[in-house]
Image (cartoon, helix red, strand yellow):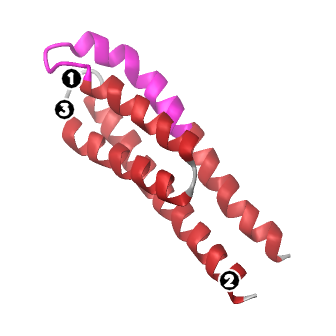
C-alpha cells in the first residue's frame, strides 16, 4: 500500500514539474516570436529537462516529442526569424498537448485513490 502512495506522490510531482517546465517553455517561445526577444537557450533547457524527466518516468513518447521540439529549435539559426515565427504556433500547440499529458498523469492518481 505504501508503494501506491509513493507512486502517486511521484506522479503528482512529475505532473507539477511538467506543468511548470511547459509554462516556461511557452512563455519563452512567445517572447521569441516577432521581435525575437526571447532566449532560445532557456527554451531548449526546459525542453531537454522535460525530455529527461519524461524518459525517467516511463513516458517515452512524450520524451520523443520533446526531442522533436528540440530538433526544430536547434535547427533554427539566429538569423532565421521568419522561420521561427512559423514554428512558434505549432510548438506552443505541442506544449499544450504535453500539458494535457500532465493533467492526465495527475488525474490517474486522483481517480486511483477515490
Q: What kind of element bears circle 3? A: loop
The answer to whether residue 11 is above or below residue 5 is above
Which label sits in the foreground, 3 or 2? Answer: 2
Q: Main secondary structure of the magenta part?
A: helix
Quadrant of the snapshot with the N terminus: bottom right
| Residue at which label 1 appears | 35
User: Which residue corresponds to the image point at 69% horizontal and 53% vertical from the top-left?
Assistant: 104
Mark number for residue 51? none
**Mark 2 → mark 1, Cα distance in angstroms:** 49 Å
Q: What kind of element bears circle 2? A: helix
The answer to whether marks 1 and 3 mark residues whose Cβ atoms lie closer than 8 Å is yes
Q: What kind of element bears circle 1? A: loop
Q: Mark 1 or mark 2, which is nearer the start of the sequence?
A: 2
**Mark 1 → mark 3, Cα distance in angstroms:** 6 Å
User: Which residue corresponds to the image point at 13% horizontal and 14% vertical from the top-left?
Assistant: 79
Number of disc labels? 3
- Left/right placement of residue 13 relative to residue 50 reads right
Q: Quadrant of residue 72?
A: top left
Q: Residues within 10 Å of mark 3 (few under 14, many from 20)?
A: few
Front residue of 54/19: it is: 54
The answer to whether marks 3 and 2 mark residues whose Cβ atoms lie closer than 8 Å is no
| Residue at which label 3 appears | 37
Q: Position of residue 113 (x, y in %)?
A: 80, 76
Which stretch did the figure color magenta?
75-96
Query: Residue 88, can we see it?
Result: yes
Q: Quadrant of residue 75?
A: top left
Mark number for residue 3? 2
Q: Mark 2 or mark 3, which is nearer the start of the sequence?
A: 2
- Left/right placement of residue 96 relative to residue 103 reads left
Q: Residue furthest left?
A: 79
Amino acid at each position: 500500500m505504501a508503494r501506491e502512495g509513493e507512486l502517486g506522490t511521484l506522479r503528482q510531482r512529475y505532473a507539477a514539474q511538467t506543468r511548470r517546465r511547459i509554462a516556461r517553455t511557452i512563455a519563452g517561445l512567445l517572447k521569441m516570436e516577432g521581435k525575437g526577444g526571447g532566449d532560445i537557450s532557456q527554451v531548449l533547457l526546459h525542453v531537454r529537462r522535460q525530455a529527461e524527466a519524461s524518459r525517467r518516468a516511463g513516458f517515452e513518447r512524450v520524451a520523443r516529442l520533446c526531442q522533436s521540439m528540440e530538433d526544430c529549435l536547434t535547427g533554427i539559426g539566429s538569423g532565421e526569424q521568419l522561420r521561427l515565427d512559423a514554428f512558434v504556433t505549432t510548438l506552443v500547440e505541442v506544449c499544450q498537448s504535453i500539458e494535457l499529458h500532465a493533467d492526465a498523469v495527475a488525474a490517474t492518481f486522483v481517480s486511483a485513490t477515490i
